[in-house]
Amino acid sequence: MKWLAAIVAFSLCTLIGYIRSSKIGARSEVLSLILHDLRQITAQLEYTSLPIGELLKKIDLSLPELWEKLSDRLSQGKSLVEAWQEVLEERSETPISALENDEIAVLNNFFSTFGTSDKETQKQNIKNACKQLESILNEVDKESKSKQKAFFTVGVLTGLALAILML
Amino acid sequence: MLNTSPLIKDNGLAFYFPNRLKQAISFACSNPRIEEIRIRANAPIQVITSAGEYILRGESAMQYIITPEDCMNIYMALCEQSLYACEEDTRQGFLTIPGGYRVGICGKVLLENGTIKRFTAVNALNIRISKQCIGCADTVMPNIYTQHGVKSILIISAPAIGKTTLLRDIARQLSQISQNPPIKVCIVDERSEIAGCYNGIPQNTMGMRCDCLDNCPKAIGITMAIRSLSPSVLITDEIGKPEDAKAILDARTCGISVIASAHAGSISDAVKRPVISELIRQRVFDGIVHISIHKSVRKYSYFDISEVQL
């Protein structure tokens, strides 16, 4: 029985450590994908003048679940701010659940002005949002390199310590 | 036969309006005689039909008063939340939405180097309901398409009498004529009104031998069409600038028939306009069709160019 409890405690702690470390990895991955998609949108804006809803449907983006949801809300006649807020509220169903307050604030700010100006200002706005997201990504990357390993190790070690105490 | 676009049948115009107005707009659009919906900030919604105007009212005859925010929200919805996508159109003061409806914009204009950059605040919108009147050109077609080919015609009338509707049906009927060599119709549609293109696709039935240069300035479009589309008939609307006249003259000397429209209350008014007068003097057109309206009934009168006195 003791052995079983020790194995369960060890596995649980390791799993928590693993989940925590992979969450840091997911945040950085999703941020990179969003940056990639925003750059794709800028590139498309250079050549087409499609409205945002159609643009998101026509280009091949890295986070289709997120952009399809946004595009669907827009096709229901919602404003971009309303559509984005609804997508955020349901973010547990999309990859952006890995994002944290800093990057969500940047995206909120970006979507509150998107579509309200001419093409040049629009491209400038995307560039600014990309810059801010890049700096967050750099910090997250630095952090994740050290923290990812640390969380996993702490998880394993805590599990091991608990298992020893139990035995 | 009056063909209202599928968008109106589905009450689709209501899509662009705030929730509290959707039902009333759908109801207004169900009127087959509707011509315009006029939205003004701090004013009720005015609906113009061929029988006159009325103010849109809700329950207990209450008027719907449009707020400045409503105006801006409707404008943003018409631009599909993307003003950058409508930059070119809005610079000219209008938008074209699915169904080929033209929306006139009024508000505060932002200028850059003396040209309109965009509207910073929109306080009024005029939604012109596009209708395709299949067969409205039947009475004038014998004057346009004869055994000698397609004649060059100038269509004149006062604004909002039906020049574009007539041009549209002439284009449709000519492009459906099966003969050898075929009649290749090219529409140079500067304001997306004739074919009612949305994203370059005509929203009106234009026939199988019809090409449409959408949103293209007339003079440039006519030259492009001559070079690359080998049209036998060129159709364009609201001519009036010297460069339009030059391009039309070029097309005529290339052996292309031109059917165009111009604002003028009568032939005597038309000849007072220098550009039109010059085109008539040079016998660019073979005839003139004048549209008049009396008690909601349109009358199409054809005049041979030899009858026109300068």
Image: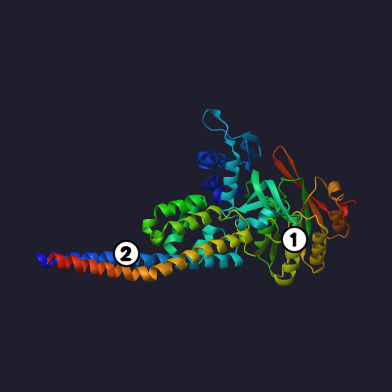
The residue that label 2 is drawn on is A20
The residue that label 1 is drawn on is B218
Q: Nearer the viewer, residue B12 or A21?
A: A21
Examine the rendered structure and indicate whether residue B157 appears above or below residue A152: above
- Amino acid carrying label 1: it is Lys
| Within-10-Å neighbours for mark 1: few <14, some 14–19, many 20+ | many
The residue that appears at 52% across and 50% down in the rendered structure is A79
Query: Image check: B8 left or right of A136?
Result: right
Query: Image check: A25 left or right of B159?
Result: left
- Amino acid carrying label 2: it is Arg
What kind of element bears circle 2?
helix
Q: Nearer the viewer, residue B274 or B310?
A: B274
Query: Disc 1 and disc 2: Cα gap in Å?
Result: 64 Å
Quadrant for residue B57, please give it. Answer: top right
Q: Position of residue B145 (x, y in %)?
A: 74, 59
Q: Position of residue A136 (x, y in %)?
A: 47, 64
Give the chain of mark 1: B
Quadrant for residue B253, please give it. Answer: bottom right
Examine the rendered structure and indicate whether residue B130 appears above or below residue B182: above
- Same subunit, tags 1 and 2: no
What kind of element bears circle 1?
helix
The residue that appears at 28% across and 70% down in the rendered structure is A153
Query: Image check: B35 left or right of B249?
Result: left
Residue B3 image label:
none
**Residue lying at the far left of the rendered structure:** A1
Q: Position of residue B204 (x, y in %)?
A: 61, 55
| Within-10-Å neighbours for mark 2: few <14, some 14–19, many 20+ | some
